[in-house]
Structure formats: C-alpha cells, structure tokens
Image (spheres, rainbow, N blue to C red):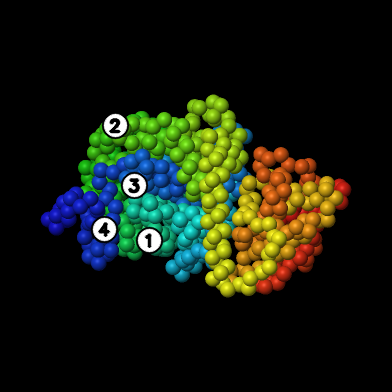
Amino acid sequence: MRAEGFWRLVTWFLGFSLVVPHCPEAVTEEEMILNSLSLCYHNKLILAPMVRVGTLPMRLLALDYGADIVYCETSGTFSSCETETLHPLNSNSPVPLLPDTDGVLLCCPRRSAVAPSQLTATSTSQVQAILLPRPPKELGLQELIDLKMIQCKRVVNEVLSTVDFVAPDDRVVFRTCEREQNRVVFQMGTSDAERALAVARLVENDVAGIDVNMGCPKQYSTKGGMGAALLSDPDKIEKILSTLVKGTRIPVTCKIRILPSLEDTLSLVKRIERTGIAAIAVHGRKREERPQHPVSCEVIKAISDTLSIPVIANGGSHDHIQQYSDIEDFRQATAASSVMVARAAMWNPSIFLKEGLRPLEEVMQKYIRYAVQYDNHYTNTKYCLCQMLREQLESPQGRLLHAAQSSREICEAFGLGAFYEETTQELDAQQARLSAKTSEETGEPAEDTSGVIKMAIKFDRRAYPAQITPKMCLLEWCRREKLAQPVYETVQRPLDRLFSSIVTVAEQKYQSTLWDKSKKLAEQAAAIVCLRSQGLPEGRLGEESPSLHKRKREAPDQDPGGPRAQELAQPGDLCKKPFVALGSGEESPLEGW
C-alpha cells in the first residue's frame, strides 16, 4: 500500500493519472505500465455521454467553455436520420423528446467518407463482422453499439481533418478530431467482453479513454443485456472490465446507476474497483428512476468514501446544477473526485465557464459553426438547438428553427447564411483538390474536357424530397424547353471503382469534379452542375420546383430504362444512356433512388 500511496501522490503533482489498481493481483505490472500515462480523473469537469447530443460539435463546444473531459454519445445511430424528421416515437409533435443522460445516437453526415483513394483506412484488427437484423421500428432508436462498431473501418477524412469510423452502409458511427484526442472518452454499450475489446482496440489510438455504459435504463439498451441490465450480472461486469483493462493501452472506466440497497451498491463498486479501472462514474439514481426523482447524493458520497479510485458524480442537473458554482457544491455534497454534467450542459454548454453562463444566442451560433465545419447532419444539429431553446421554441427564432429542413436553412435562421456558403464552398474545394490529386497519382490518361462546365458538387439525397431528384428536374426543364433528353456518359475508375458522369444538354456538357461511389450518384451530381449553371431549381427541400411527375420508389439495385441497360459500368467501360422519359400519366420507378 505504501507504493500505491506514493504513485497516487505522484499523480497529484504531475496532473495525469497512473492507473494503480486497488487489487494488484488483478492486473500485472506490464499491464499497469501499458495504462500508465493517461487521463487524470481528479477534480475534473466532464461532459456526460448523452443520447443525440454528444457528437463532435457539442464536445468541442464544451471544451471551449472549460470542460476538462468530454464523453461521446454511446456509439449507435439515430433512426430519424433515415426519415429526416425529429418527431418523437408515437407522436406527431415536432418537438424533440429530452434525452436521458445515457443512451445512443448517431449522425450520418454527407461527407461521411470521401473517396477511398483519398483516405487512409484501417481494418477492425481482423475482427470478423457481426451482422444483426434491423431492430424493431417501435424502439425508435437503434442500439448498435459494439456490434455496429466492430463492422466499422477507421477512415482519415482529409476534407474535414477528422478520423471517422464508418459502417459498411457508409454511415459515420463515430467522428473525432485531433483537438479532442487527449480529452475524449469513447463510451460503448456492450454485453460481451471480447466484442468490447475488439472495439476498444479499434479506437484506442484516437481517444483518451474507454468507458462501458452500465447506466442506461432504456429498453433498447437493456433488452440486449447492455446498459443498466449489466448491474444485475456482476460476473459479466468483472469479465468485461478486466478484459478491457488487460487488453488496452488507455484507461478504462464505467458508468453505473445505484442499486436498490446501499449494501449491494457498495459490494458492486468494490468488485468493479478490483478489475483495475481508472475511475467510476455514478449516476445517483436507481435503474427505474428518472430525472424528476431526487438524486441520491448520500449514496454517491458513501461510494466515494469507500473506493480509492476517483468517483465521478453524475445526475445533479435537475436538482443542483444551475450555474458554474453549483458544480463544486454538488461535488462537495457527494465527496466525489469530479463531476459529470449532462442536462445542464445540454441546455447551455457554457455551464463549464467560470465567468458564468454566456448568452444563449452566442452559444447556439458557436454550436452551429462547429456543426457546419464538421458536416453534422442537420437533424442532429436541429435537435440539439431545440434542447437549448427549450421554452423559447415558440419564439420567432424557435419557429424558424422548427421550419428549417437543411443545414443551410438552420444557418439562415440564425443569421449565418453567409458563413454556411463560405464554409461549404471551402469544403467542396478541398474535396475537389484531393480528387484532382488522386487522379494525378493514379496516372490516368488526360482527357479532352474542353467545353465541359465543371463544379465540385456531391449529391446528398437527404437534401431532397422523397420523390424528387435533380435528374427529374433537369428532364422536366428539357421537356418544357423542347430540348432533347439529357444524355449521361458515366465512367468508372479502375483503381478505386468510383464513378464520374458527364451530362449533355443542348450540346453543352456538364460534370462534377468529384468522383462518387455509384453511377446513380455521379449522374445526379452532373445534373446538379447543369441546373446550377443555368440558374434552375434542382428540387432541394424548401426550394420552389417545377411540377414533376411522381414516380414510385424503386428497389436500391434497380434503375429505369431496362434491367440490363442500367447495370453499373465495368472498370474502364463507358456508359451512355438517355434519361428515361415519362409519358403523360405513365408511372415509372424513381430515378436513382
């Protein structure tokens, strides 16, 4: 114990933590060294993991305002990204539900992954992917956590200067950047030690710590044996945590809720401490309790008095934390080493600022800027802003936010329209430069593109209504002007199997300089170039569009014009086809989507 006390004294002077397990026999000396230089969990202000809230923009904002450590949301995906609505489950109301302090989420930005040739990808340490069926729609949120992360690839996104963990369906499950690398903790939901270790090894070079979610009481988590369900299985808890501590080079923590009895709670946390974790976060409510129930400061205090590792107090936003000074009061009431703030930080992230809360308008604008810079999906941005506005949702500002159907419209609602245009142009230009650099490196033969009008454009399906596409708008315009149907010439690059398309309209050619992952996406991008160069509407949400024939949604692997005519090009092949015209009253599958 003398050696242990010495090293704990060292941590106080150096400002970082040396992970010294309470039970030396639980972890070998070699394993202890691997986890040595790490986060310090003493006297820290921490942004809690929150459903739909703790994505990169919010984490960076919390750091700006004084948070020492930021936890990401439990790795998962938010189903509203598919439907592009923010309506709560079983409700027609557009007002979002308040999240619990634990949970799952994720965003699905349009720059989720640029061309593979522009990126550095790392496999999941040869871990075999585990595929699960889509969970029932009635759950509202899809709990994907470790099972989803295991399938991801690590991708360096040179456009956004981020590291993205991208699922097979091209959704970004977790996005981080260099600025937060030494202060972000990756929280995962898991019920299996080996899967947890596989995920930890995948992300350990890009985060400062690993946390296991043992506190989420929601059914979508507990039904899979994760979250608060683990509290009733101490053996599984011990196996998961011990495996992570022994198998990773960064500190491991967990976040729990208290048990019905103090005796059982203390028995559990002692067992958890013996696994060698660096700290434990305690939400001072039972599994069945919600924010309206009082937080049990006395139970957190009893845990703090019992353990030698740092205890992080959580759950005080509703009753205790209204301003910065309240954070210290809550810490003293619980005798905890640090405080983790959830809802109070969601409502106004400047709660971490010693000088006091900043005006909400300033905070929201700063959040929006991060959201645009890091290509956060607008539904997630909108949700977080709604949580900040709270009772002001019926104000003129709130009504503008509620009506917004894109990141551009959100920016315009807050007077940041010019910022949005400037930032997106810079990102598109950066992507174009990387594409051009890739083309040079591949040694592709130079093509005669004289007379081709080019723009750096990507087609984002989420920015358009369900039954409208740019190709449809272009075809309709050609009909009205009595022009020949647009003709698309699409090629596939052999090296990375990406596509580029040129559309010819009235003997003028149009092309996006950005290569796409499918023939359909490339053609849509070419159509956008043509429409924008002519100053024509392209059918985006909120944009006035010409009357179009409605088309039925087609299967993902189908395309109009005959099953064989629309097959993807083989490497090096040139595909030419006219856009399929619709006769009056004729129905056809939706082009491209």
Callout 3 amino acid: Ile
Task: Report helix, strand or loop for mark 4.
Answer: loop
Q: Which mark is residue 37?
A: 4
Residue in the foreground of this view, choosing between 17 and 219: 17
**Horizontal arrangement in the rendering, residue 118 relative to residue 502 (left or right):** left
Q: CA distance from mark 2 to mark 4?
A: 30 Å
Q: Which residue is mark 1?
A: 205
Question: What distance separates the C-alpha of mark 1 from that of mark 2?
Answer: 35 Å
Residue 331, position as x, y percentages in the image = 27, 37
Image location of residue 332, percent across then percent down: 24, 35
Per the model, the C-alpha gap separating discs 4 and 3 is 15 Å
Under tag 3, what secondary structure?
strand
**Figure quadrant of residue 63:** top left
Give me the residue at 39% from left, 58% from top: 206
Q: Residues within 10 Å of mark 3 (few under 14, many from 20)?
A: many
Task: Give the quadrant of residue 346.
Answer: top left
The C terminus sits in image quarter: bottom right
Q: Which residue is mark 2?
A: 325
Whole-number angstrom distance, CA of label 1 to CA of label 3: 17 Å
Res. 591 visible in picture: yes
Q: Which residue is mark 3?
A: 69
Residue found at the far left of this picture: 2
| Amino acid type of the residue that numbered disc 1 sits on in the rendered structure | Asn
Residue 559 location (% of width, % of height): 74, 59
